[in-house]
Amino acid sequence: MNWSPRRTTERSEVRVGGIVVRIDGTLRFLSSTVALRVEPTPRVTAVPGAPSELLGITMHEGAVVAVLALGSGRAEMIVCRHSAELIGLVGPEVVHVGLFDAADGNAGAVRHEGHDVLPLDLAMVYRRVQSGYGPTSLDPGTGTVLAGSQASPRNVRHSTT
């Protein structure tokens, strides 16, 4: 299914399609223009020397996809489009998929069960992985993507498998 932003005619409210996920207790939103599919976590091949949050790579519909770890879950992978690339997110727990009311005055945020849910800053996550800074986590108060205590590229734990 593809949910695109649309304006309803009955109430004149903006509705946005996508996925609300929970990452280590914090709710975040991925729009349907970013999140393409949710599927069981595939077999992932580790990349020697990669930052710890790059779990590795996998094949998805004939393409090699980088698989990033966000949070502790491993049951499902969310296939996302970032720029012109596909990436897989493992760790976020899918809470709800569908159409959501856009949050007033909070760009990119949606309303879910009476609360504003901020968008996941996938560009920031991607930049952190590419730069070698890690591990990252979400600040529970603001949901901002933060570097962990090992935020120096020389202190990044590398995969050995």
Image: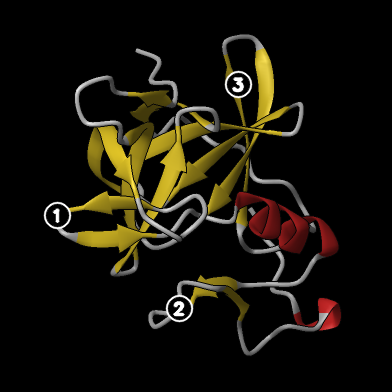
Q: Are marks 1 and 2 in contact (CB under 8 Å)?
A: no
- The residues tagged by marks 3 and 1 sit, at their Cα atoms, a distance apart of 35 Å
Q: Is residue 152 left or right of residue 113?
A: right
Place residue 5 in its image quadrant.
Answer: top left
42 or 19: nearer the viewer: 19
The residue to which callout 2 is attached is 142
Q: Say which of marks 3 and 1 sits in front.
A: 1
Question: Amino acid type of disc 1?
Answer: Glu
Q: Is residue 53 above or below residue 47?
A: below
Quarter of the figure that contains the N terminus: top left
Residue shown at 39% from the left, 79% from the top: 140
96 or 152: nearer the viewer: 96
Question: Amino acid type of disc 3?
Answer: Met
Instruction: Indicate which disc residue 113 carries.
Output: 1
Question: Amino acid type of disc 2?
Answer: Thr
Q: Residues within 10 Å of mark 3 (few under 14, many from 20)?
A: some
The single residue placed furthest to the bottom in the displayed view is 149
What is the basis of the colouring in this image?
secondary structure
Pinpoint residue 19: horizontal percent, then vertical percent: 34, 38
Q: Residues within 10 Å of mark 1 (few under 14, many from 20)?
A: few
Question: Is disc 2 placed on a helix, strand or loop?
Answer: loop
- The residues tagged by marks 3 and 2 sit, at their Cα atoms, a distance apart of 34 Å
